Image (tube, rainbow, N blue to C red):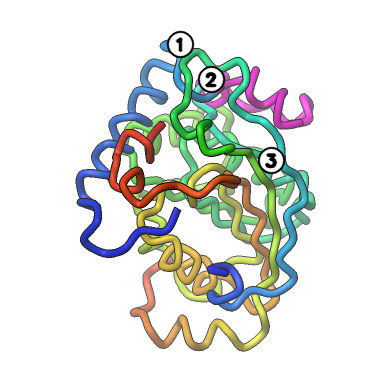
Amino acid sequence: MALQQGQLDVDSLRRAIRLEYEEVANHPELGFHFLVGRPLAAVLGYDPTWLERIPEASIESFAGTGNPFSVRQLGPGEHVVDVGSGAGIDSLIAAQMIGPAGRVLGVDMTPAMVAKARSAASTAGVANVEFRDGTAEALPVEDSWADVVISNGVLNLLPDKNAGLVEMARVLKPGGRLQIADILVQRAVPESARQEIDLWTG
Amino acid sequence: MAVINAGFVEFEITWRGDIYSGAAQSSSAANFGTLGINFSAILQAGSGDFHRSSRDTRGC
């Protein structure tokens, strides 16, 4: 949803989102307003073979809204940025698709998710993926580095979606691809509701 | 639309579906007919120059 400057305290929103996803990282069994883990992956059409070499710790905290790989699978040697990489499931799937000549940079603003993703990559022995702390509006990635930007359920959480999309454009090579999963709101959201942090996070 | 304004072309929504059914808690976002979607787009050649000139290069 679009947000006019001054309508909502962006820092408060980011804190609320971090808290929500810290819970998903540390206590995925609690139950949320969205599906998580393997049941969600099945609903979204994730090929079970993609998950065979992904550590369970990464799968259990999966909280996406779609399937970036259903648009097109990634090719050998590609550079991939995963915006809002969470516990790392999509980055680790991407790492398998691109092979040892490719590289994945996963970026997330929730420290508990970054820690879980790094641990999962280490457990899986995946060497072509790196997880960095950062926000979608200021990606810690150099200009024109990526062939593909993937993201899953993150764009809707950004107070400034334009800034996030401009950053994705900055890190992509000309002709590079966006493969994004997110949400679509079919009914207009009242201006008053746009200022409710609970609505943004739930 | 924001995707096109950021310099992308060939925007296409490739899937949309209910992603809230079966969740442990009800979602207030569901009141607005929220669906999960997949979409793709291509960065238009040359459009990145504008974005690159507006930011410092970050180390990779």
Disc 3 and disc 2: Cα gap in Å?
Answer: 16 Å
Q: Amino acid at mark 2?
A: Glu
2 and 1 marks in contact (CB < 8 Å):
yes
Residue B59 in the image: x percent, y percent?
38, 69
Looking at the rendered structure, which numbered label has been put on residue B58?
none
- A41 drawn magenta: yes
Q: Residues within 10 Å of mark 3 (few under 14, many from 20)?
A: many
Q: Nearer the viewer, mark 2 or mark 1?
A: 1
- Point out the tag, 2 or 1, that comes first from the N-terminus: 1
Q: Which mark is residue A60?
A: 2
Judge left or right: residue A52 versus residue B25: right
Q: Tell which subunit mark 2 falls on.
A: A
Identity, as a three-letter code, of the amino acid under mark 1: Glu
Mark 3 — on which chain does it sit? A
**What x and y, as percent, mark residue A93?**
66, 39
Which chain letter matches label 1?
A
Highlighted range, magenta: A35-59
Q: Is residue A197 left or right of residue A140?
A: left
- Mark 3 belongs to which amino acid? Asn
Please identify, in this view, whether the residue under mark 3 or under mark 2 is nearer the observer: 3
Q: Is residue A137 visible?
A: yes
Mark 1 secondary-structure assignment: helix
Task: Indicate the position of residue A199 as horizontal and vertical percent values.
Answer: 37, 36
Report if residue A182 is visible in the image: no
Q: What residue did someone put label 1 on?
A: A29
Q: Quadrant of residue B15?
A: top right
Is residue A195 shown in magenta? Answer: no
Q: Residue at x 72, y 49 (%)?
A: A99
